[in-house]
Image (cartoon, helix red, strand yellow):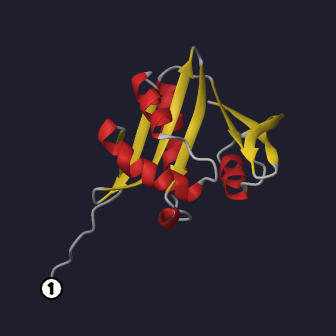
Amino acid sequence: MSAVLKPEASLRPMLAADLDAICRIEPTIFPYPWTRGNFDDSLKSGYSCWVYEHAGEVLGYAVLMMVLDEAHLLNISIAAPWQGKGYGRSLLAHVMDIARGHGALNMFLEVRPSNQAALGLYESMGFNEMAIRRGYYPAPNGREDAVLMGVAL
């Protein structure tokens, strides 16, 4: 009897060809998703954009903007069927390493206070609450605050 190894998930730079898959995932996990134009602009601007894939299927992605010695995580997402399996943690660790490699001393991000899973992940990776950005996100009842979080790299 021989064992058949399953392909591992892998990280790679995002390509324009990935945008269809990304734009299918984004609205399934966010009530106010990024548009194709947001992702396209991020690629064209030279942001550090990454895709997590498994057997040719995009299961997650991240967009990181570098400004001098600071990194700002603009988007990090794992498709719903793949959440809770450690892929988000792995993707976050990867972009933190990328930021360090580009000389970032700190990384920042905003997160909805209602996104308890994301808050837990960020805190477990060393991020701390720094401030509240009032009315930062659109919400069904108007606006929702954002928690600004940061970590020293």
Q: Amino acid at mark 1?
A: Met
Viewer-nearest residue: 40 or 55? 40
Q: At x 36% / y 56%, what residue is drawn?
A: 9
Position in image of residue 1 (x %, y %): 15, 85
* Residue ID at (40%, 45%): 51
Residue 152 appearing in the image: yes
Please provide percent x and percent y for residue 81.
49, 67
Question: Dot 1: few (<14), some (14–19), or many (≥20) neighbours within 10 Å?
Answer: few
Report the number of discs.
1
Question: In this figure, which residue is indicated by the disc labeled 1?
Answer: 1
Q: Position of residue 83 (x, y in %)?
A: 54, 62
Q: Residue at x 76, y 52 (%)?
A: 140
User: Who is closer to the viewer here, 109 or 124?
Assistant: 109
Q: Position of residue 18 (x, y in %)?
A: 34, 44
Label 1 secondary element: loop
Observer-nearest residue: 105 or 143? 143
- Image position of 118 with respect to 134: above or below: below
Q: Of all residues shown, which one is farthest toward the front?
A: 141
Q: Is residue 39 above or below residue 26?
A: above
Q: Quadrant of the C terminus?
A: top right
- The reply to whether residue 11 is visible in this rendering is no
